[in-house]
Image: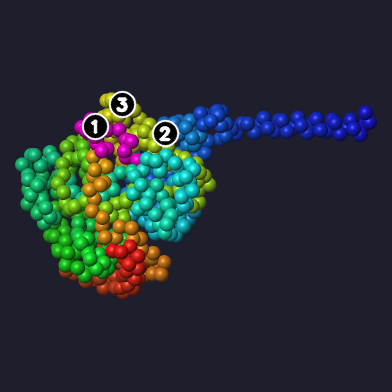
Amino acid sequence: MSNKKTRFSVLLTALLAFALVVSACGSDNKTESNGNGGSSEKPVELIWYTIGVPQKDLAKVNEKINEYTKEKINATVNMKMIDFGDYTQKMQVMVSSGEPMDILFTSSWAFDYVQNARKGAFTAIDDLLETSGKGIKETLDPAFLEGSKVDGHNYGVPANKELPAQEVWRFNDELVKKYNLDIKSVTTMESLEPLLKTIKDNEPQVTPLSLTKDFVPLMPFDYIIEKLPMAVYLDTTDYKVLNIFDTPELKAALDTMHKFYEAGYISPEAATTTSVEDLYKSGKWFTDRASTQPLAENLWTASYGYPVTSTPAGKAYTFNWSVMGSMQAISANSEHPEKAMEFLNLLNTDPVLRNMIDSGIEGVHYEKVSENVMKNLPDSKNYDMPTFSLGNLLITYLNENDPENKWELFKEFNASGIDAPLLGFNFDATKVSKEIAAVQNVKEEFWSALMTGAVDPNEFLPKANEKFKAAGLDKVIAEVQSQLDAWKAANNK
């Protein structure tokens, strides 16, 4: 063999040896087989922003979640919670600044789903549902995916829960029984007054009517955009868009709220309060208003540790916002959209993961009574998550007081809802985006103070209305009306 060939052979051998060394060193960055088809790839970490009061034991539970998801889909999740009242504003800032995230909670009432889908904040998931999200399509009531399309595309996975929205007045039942109060007599907000007065006169440490700054009196409107003053009447036949600040229903509701505020039934800080979790934990509240679902009283009672009862405040309507009331979207900036969809698919189909995220660690926060029934342990107070916001409700464990047919009752409730007039209509605000922003600024100035009764509507309602009109509300309403008329004609309404 010539010296030239010998030198080439030696060089080739050296290069091969070097390649093997580099390959071996590279294996330090891989994980061992983790149950995901024998894959040895490094687990993907998904960043998940969700809504709710940050929980003391979140990190402890998150660690257990990751042990499970790493084995199942070779991914971990970093859960980050933002309180209800702060969620929209903080998410707007983080999404605009390109903060790293993969999955985020969105809805019709917090970090608006439709508007942010149109702004490009979310990844369209139509194709992902067909590949990594097949279990979601098989499990989810089809009405949710159909009803949450934006311009023909899905951008989020709705929680499989109640479809209609029905408001109820909730009551601390210990106080109801103590004073022998007739909650069935409460049919309107005004009819609450005798009960509130009883509590105010006899329980000085109790907040009679518990509110946060997001409270809006129950009125007969279907809103174009939640918590902005454009709406149609629930019984509309002409689909005329109203400025609710020009309606007698709003004036009457605000008068009642201010009367309650002046009487001391409402906390003086209500207009700036983002959470009343402390009242629920202490039991120092008498009534509030909430959206219900079948057997909701059992859920509230189990969560708070004392009996909660309720009476209807309105009928069950299926609104856009109830269909889109709880969703998880994949960020448009996610580096791992396929893996994010794998996680959402697991979340919505796997009872072990879904219940761990919802109820915490078995033996610490809850214990199993039977195969699909649980009861909370004392440490559940350190991990009390908003069940509705975390995916498929219909695979969560039953509480001890729940009947076996609970989820059948949900299906019956979903079938009973009255379709709201705007169901399926999604306003495109592109042509009036500046005016919408200006209207939003006026809303921030006046809305909470008026709706919680903190200011006199005789003085502040005209001021707010004047500013709304100066901000371009009439132009917005005209654009809404134009789009609504076209939608009405196209859908034979």
For the residue labelled by badge 3, is the local secondary structure a helix, a strand or a loop?
A: loop
Q: From this viewpoint, is residue 413 visible? A: yes
Q: Is residue 46 above or below residue 113?
A: above
Which dot, 2 or 1, sits closer to the camera?
1
Q: Tell me the number on the disc at residue 65.
A: 2
The spot of residue 105 in percent (x, y) is 38, 48
Residue drawn at (8%, 39%) of the image: 177
Q: Residue 405 location, x and y as percent? A: 24, 34
Mark 1 neighbour class, 10 Å CA radius: few under 14, some 14 to 19, many 20 or more: few
Quadrant of residue 69 in the image? top left
User: Residue pushed farthest left?
Assistant: 180
Task: Tell me the number on the disc at residue 371.
Answer: 3
Mark nearer the viewer, 3 or 2? 3
Instruction: Tell me if residue 267 comes above or below residue 473 in the rendering.
Output: above
Dot 3 amino acid type: Glu
Which numbered dot is residue 404? 1
Q: Position of residue 462 (x, y in %)?
A: 21, 71
Q: Is residue 279 left or right of residue 61?
A: left
Is any part of residue 47 visible from this angle? no
Residue 385 part of the magenta-drawn span = no
Amino acid at circle 2: Ile
Q: Nearer the viewer, residue 157 or 81?
A: 157
Label 1 near label 2: C-beta < 8 Å?
no
Judging from the image, what secondary structure is the residue with disc 1 in? loop
Q: Nearer the viewer, mark 1 or mark 3?
A: 1
Q: Position of residue 398 (x, y in %)?
A: 27, 33
Mark 3–mark 2 Cα distance, whole angstroms, equals: 20 Å
Query: Over which residues does the magenta segment extend?
Result: 392-408
Query: Tag 2, which secondary structure?
Result: helix
- Of mark 3 and mark 2, the one earlier in the sequence is 2
Type of amino acid at the residue the image marks with label 1: Glu
Horizontal arrangement in the rendering, residue 221 relative to residue 352 (left or right): left
